[in-house]
Every structure is written in structure tokens, then in C-alpha cells.
Image (spheres, rainbow, N blue to C red):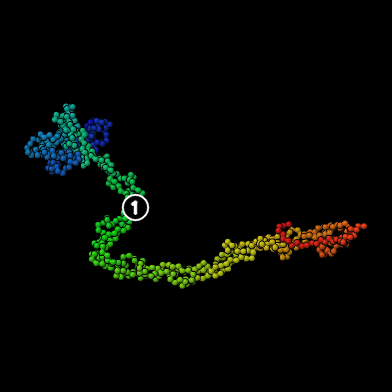
């Protein structure tokens, strides 16, 4: 890529108002980058200066320009220098200024002082064409004319045009030798076309516009040197809390509360609703003759003149008029309201009475005013009336005042038998059961065998059963009597002769069997006779004295006989345990 191509690219960028200091490189070369920037700045500088020249020629004044930026400084300088040139031409002064006003100002002075036709070709939006420049196309392509200069190769620094005349690229002008080219400082001539807030920087063959100050907080610089607002809400870089929603604004953002406060309140920075002091924030919210008193969420206007209760000042503040309390709010809480001068009264509904002190309708407590006359059992007061209720075991009668007995037995509350009584009920149990001490409803079995008299119920052993009991006897020798409690004795083997005792033994009947007993008479005695009748349930063995000869002791012994009797007795003792 040639230097000319680098310069053409810089000039092209200037015509689209791009930033000359950040032009994309078309070739990786420091020289090409410098040529791009300088050619870009040259075009912009010429445009700025051309704007000032045209203003001087069309308006004849430079007062509309402000010298607060580099752009306007250059434009104003070229405008002032052009006015000087026009003034010199009108006074027939030479167009070569003798004042030390600088090279660019001298150029503009000469341009405006010279033939005006050359200057009129310049417009505010196009690059100024100074006399040293050619009439080639925008791309600088003049190949047809360049063929005429082939006989003089290397004569011109940039291009050769018709008649072997040298010309320069855009952004350059011919030097006095008519061959070499030098850069046009567009910034000095005011032809830079930079916008407000941008500084014109001359480059080789062009110029570039650079912002004098940064975009500031909330803005970012775009590729075309413009400041673009940063959408903090869209990018998520805001610091609004969860109770707020973000709203983007130019250069900033706002945190709007999600919950709106009611009238009379305003939201603080933390999202809390605080009261608005209308007396301070508004101008005279009250009428003449009143002063403002702030309240929570609102305000009230109080009169400076005390009209007394039930009256207030009229709008003119000249006299007191009656307040119609019945029109303002529901002062009687649903009851009829009748306004009177300076006051009001309430026509209370049935069950209410008007309190002249508090001026409200109060409920009448009928239960307290008429004790014992409204309800048979319990009276409960209600707003404007009353209601009756009954104690446990009763239900409210159809008249709503008396109480009828409730037959609880219909719901079978007892486990066995139920007896309804007035206002209650009584549970009772069948024979062999007793009522539980815990709930008074359940029937529990009576253990007759465990009662204090249980040992005498059965002669031998007692067995408890649900609701009753039964007795039992020993397995051998006894049977249960017909009364179900006693045990009958066994068969008397001694009486029936079914025993197995020997001849010299006596049979003794026992419960459930018999025993064979033997008895020998003592010395000097002998057994005589047979036993008594067995029907007497006894066995008797009789021994009579039989002394030996010469046994005086035996003879003198007064005992004549010894009898042994065995008696079988029925058993009536208590059996504590099976035997």
C-alpha cells in the first residue's frame, strides 16, 4: 500500500466525521498510521476554516461564534482573518498583510482579499479548495491527465495534471516552487468540521476531532466519537434493592419503589412510607382565618377564632355557622342522625340507648337490666339484643327462653343400663357388675371371690366368672351340694362295712376315706366286749382290770376299766388353699 492510499483513507474518514486519532489501520506501518491521521486532520481543519470564511462573507460578522472550544476557536480565527482581508480589499490595501498574525491567518487574509470568486466555491460542509489544489475526482484518480506528464517523470511531488502542471492530494497544497506539496492545516483554517466539545487536531493531509472532556459518569464513548448513555438497568450494574425496580435515565438511573405509598405519604430512600407534612410542603393549604395542623397521612385546618363546639367559621372567616355533623361522617355508627344547632342527636335502634355525654348509641345489656326475667337458665348479651342458653342436661325450648330436659339416655352413654333424671342421667349395672369409679359410665365385673366374705361363699374353692362365680370341691371324696356352694361328705366305709380293717383293728372314717386303728389294753387290763352301735359314728374299745395274783397294787387301784372311743367329726374349717 502506498502513502497516497494511506492519505486517501484518512481523508475519507474525515468526510464521515470519524475520530482521526482512532482510525482503523489499513496497513501495519507506523508511517501509514501517521499519514492516515494527518490527512484526516487536514480535511477537518480546512472544513472548520471554510465555515468561518463563509460566515464572514455571508453574515459579515463573527459574533455568533464562541471561542470556548478548539473547533469554534479555529472557525472564529478564520472568520476574523477573512473580515480583515475583506476590509483591506475595501480600503484598497495590499492583500499581503504586514501584521504578524500567523501563517494560517495570512493565508485566509489573502484568500478573502483576493478575487471573491475563488472563495465562493467553499461551503460549510465541504473541504476548502485553495488555489494550490487540483480539480481531480474524489479518489484522486487522474490517470488520463497523468499520461501527458509522462515526458517529465518525477517532476511533481504528488500528481501531474494538464499542461504539465503539478497538483497535490486532498489535504495538501503546492509550495511556491509549484512542484512540492505541503500539508494544509485544516484546524488552523477552521475547516475541521468538529462538533461542539471536540478539539481539532491537524494530521498530515487531514485532521481529526478529539473530545476535550470525557463523556462523564453514565455515558460511554462510541466508535464514531459520540457519547452514548449506559443502560445500568439492562446491564445489571445498578444498586437498587429488592424492594425497588430500576428505571434507566440519561446518564444515570432511578430506583423506583415496587410498592406505592398511599396518599399523604412518600417513600424514603429505604422504601419506607413516611408521612408528608402538608403544612410545610404546600403553600397555604388552609383558608384564611385557619392554621394548618399536620396529621398522620393528612392535615387539618383549625380556625384561629374559636366558634365553640358544633360551629365553625364560614369561608370568608367572618362569622360562625352550624356544623352539620350528620353530613360529614357516620357519627351515629349506622343509627339515624338528626342535626340540631351546634350539635346533633342519634335516633337509636331497638336494643340501644343514646348516651348524651359520649353522644353515641350504646348497647343495652338486657341480661343485667332484667336479671332472671328473660331466660330460664343463662342469658348472654349481644349487640342490640340478647340470647338464652341452657346448662348441661337441658336444651333450649321452642320459645327461645325456657329449657327442656335432655334425655341423654337416647344417645346410649352407658355401657349397660341408663336412667334419665332431670337435667342429667345415671348409669347402673346388672347383677355381678359394679360402676367404674373412673368415668361413672363403664360397668366392671365384681370379683365375688376377692370380697372380704369371699372365703365363706364356697366351702372349698371359689372361681370368679364375668358377672358371677362358681364353687368347686376336692377331686376325691367330695361332691358339690345342690346349693352349689357346700361339699358333701364321702361314704362312711366303716358304717357300710366296706372297709378293709383286720379283726383286731378299728375302722375310723375320715373325709374322703377311712383309717384302720389298733389299740392294745395296758398291763393288768384286758379287752372285753364289742364296740357300740356303729350308727353312733363312734368306735369304743373297753378294757377291764384283770390283776395278777398277789398284785396288791393292782387290786388297790381304783380304776376299774378303760374305754377308748373314736369319733368321726364333720369338717367346717376354711380351705385357704387346695389340699
Say which residue appears at 28% left-offset and 42% top-offset: 220
Say which residue appears at 26% left-offset and 31% top-offset: 29
Say which residue appears at 35% left-offset and 69% top-offset: 356
Say which residue appears at 45% left-offset and 71% top-offset: 371
Q: Is residue 10 above or below residue 218?
A: above
Pointer 1: residues within 10 angstroms few (<14), some, or many (20+)? some
Which quarter of the rendered picture does the C terminus lie within? bottom right
Residue at the right extreme? 549
Closer to the camera in the image, 150 or 397:
397
Q: Position of residue 374 (x, y in %)?
A: 46, 72
Which quarter of the rendered picture does the N terminus lie within? top left
Residue at the left extreme? 92
Disc 1 element: loop
Q: Is residue 331 above or below residue 155?
A: below
Q: Position of residue 452 (x, y in %)?
A: 66, 62
Q: Is residue 118 visible?
A: no
**Which quarter of the picture shows residue 140?**
top left
Q: Position of residue 454 (x, y in %)?
A: 68, 62
Q: Is residue 246 left or right of residue 566?
A: left
Identify the residue position indicated by label 1 in the image: 272
Q: Is residue 433 visible?
A: yes
Give the tally of numbered discs.
1
Amino acid at each position: 500500500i502506498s502513502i497516497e492510499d494511506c492519505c486517501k483513507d484518512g481523508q475519507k474518514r474525515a468526510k464521515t466525521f470519524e475520530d482521526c486519532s482512532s482510525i482503523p489501520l489499513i496497513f501495519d506501518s507506523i508511517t501509514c498510521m501517521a499519514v492516515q491521521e494527518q490527512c484526516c486532520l487536514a480535511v477537518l481543519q480546512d472544513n472548520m476554516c471554510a465555515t468561518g470564511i463563509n460566515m464572514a462573507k455571508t453574515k459579515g460578522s463573527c459574533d455568533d461564534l464562541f471561542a470556548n472550544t478548539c473547533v469554534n476557536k479555529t472557525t472564529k480565527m478564520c472568520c476574523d482573518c477573512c473580515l480583515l482581508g475583506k476590509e483591506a480589499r475595501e480600503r484598497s490595501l495590499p492583500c499581503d498583510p504586514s501584521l504578524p498574525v500567523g501563517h494560517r491567518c495570512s493565508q485566509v487574509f489573502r484568500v478573502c482579499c483576493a478575487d471573491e470568486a475563488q472563495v465562493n466555491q467553499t461551503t460549510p460542509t465541504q473541504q476548502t479548495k485553495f488555489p494550490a489544489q487540483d480539480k481531480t475526482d474524489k479518489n484522486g484518480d487522474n490517470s488520463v491527465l497523468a499520461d501527458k506528464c509522462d515526458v517529465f517523470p518525477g517532476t511533481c511531488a504528488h500528481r501531474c495534471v494538464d499542461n504539465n502542471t503539478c497538483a497535490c492530494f486532498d489535504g495538501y497544497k503546492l509550495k511556491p516552487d509549484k512542484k512540492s506539496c505541503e500539508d494544509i492545516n485544516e484546524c488552523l483554517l477552521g475547516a475541521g468540521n468538529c462538533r461542539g466539545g471536540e478539539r481539532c487536531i491537524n494530521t498530515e493531509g487531514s485532521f481529526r476531532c478529539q473530545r476535550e472532556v470525557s463523556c462523564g459518569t453514565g455515558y460511554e464513548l462510541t466508535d464514531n466519537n459520540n457519547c452514548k448513555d449506559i443502560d445500568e438497568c439492562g446491564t445489571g450494574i445498578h444498586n437498587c434493592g429488592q424492594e425497588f425496580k430500576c428505571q434507566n435515565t440519561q446518564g444515570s438511573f432511578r430506583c423506583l419503589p415496587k410498592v406505592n405509598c398511599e396518599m399523604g405519604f412518600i417513600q424514603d430512600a429505604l422504601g419506607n412510607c413516611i408521612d408528608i407534612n402538608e403544612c410545610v410542603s404546600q403553600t397555604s393549604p388552609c383558608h384564611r382565618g385557619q392554621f394548618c395542623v399536620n396529621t398522620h397521612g393528612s392535615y387539618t385546618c383549625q380556625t384561629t377564632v374559636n366558634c365553640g363546639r358544633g360551629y365553625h367559621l364560614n369561608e370568608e372567616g367572618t362569622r360562625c355557622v352550624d356544623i352539620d355533623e350528620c353530613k360529614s361522617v357516620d357519627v351515629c355508627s349506622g343509627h339515624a342522625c338528626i342535626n340540631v344547632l351546634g350539635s346533633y342527636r342519634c335516633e337509636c335502634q331497638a336494643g340501644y340507648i343514646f348516651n348524651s355525654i359520649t353522644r353515641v348509641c350504646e348497647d343495652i345489656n338486657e341480661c343485667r337490666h332484667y336479671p332472671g326475667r328473660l331466660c330460664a337458665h343463662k342469658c348472654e348479651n349481644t349487640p342490640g339484643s340478647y340470647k338464652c342458653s341452657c346448662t348441661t342436661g337441658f336444651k333450649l325450648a321452642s320459645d327461645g327462653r325456657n329449657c327442656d330436659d335432655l334425655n341423654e339416655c337416647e344417645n346410649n352413654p352407658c355401657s349397660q343400663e341408663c336412667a334419665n333424671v332431670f337435667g342429667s342421667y345415671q348409669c347402673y349395672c346388672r347383677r355381678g357388675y359394679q360402676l367404674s369409679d373412673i368415668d361413672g359410665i363403664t360397668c366392671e365385673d365384681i370379683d365375688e371371690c376377692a370380697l372380704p366374705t369371699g372365703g365363706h361363699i364356697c366351702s372349698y374353692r371359689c372361681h370368679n366368672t364375668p358377672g358371677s362365680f362358681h364353687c368347686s370341691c376336692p377331686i376325691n371324696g367330695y361332691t358339690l351340694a345342690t346349693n352349689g356352694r357346700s361339699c358333701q361328705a364321702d361314704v362312711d366305709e366303716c358304717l357300710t362295712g366296706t372297709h378293709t380293717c383286720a379283726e383286731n383293728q378299728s375302722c375310723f372314717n375320715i373325709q374322703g376315706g377311712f383309717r384302720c386303728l389298733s389299740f392294745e389294753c395296758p398291763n393288768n387290763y384286758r379287752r372285753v366286749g364289742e364296740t357300740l352301735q356303729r350308727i353312733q359314728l363312734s368306735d369304743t374299745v373297753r378294757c377291764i382290770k384283770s390283776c395278777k395274783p398277789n398284785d396288791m397294787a393292782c387290786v388297790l387301784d381304783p380304776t376299774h376299766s378303760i374305754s377308748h372311743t373314736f369319733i368321726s367329726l364333720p369338717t367346717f374349717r376354711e380351705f385357704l388353699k387346695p389340699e
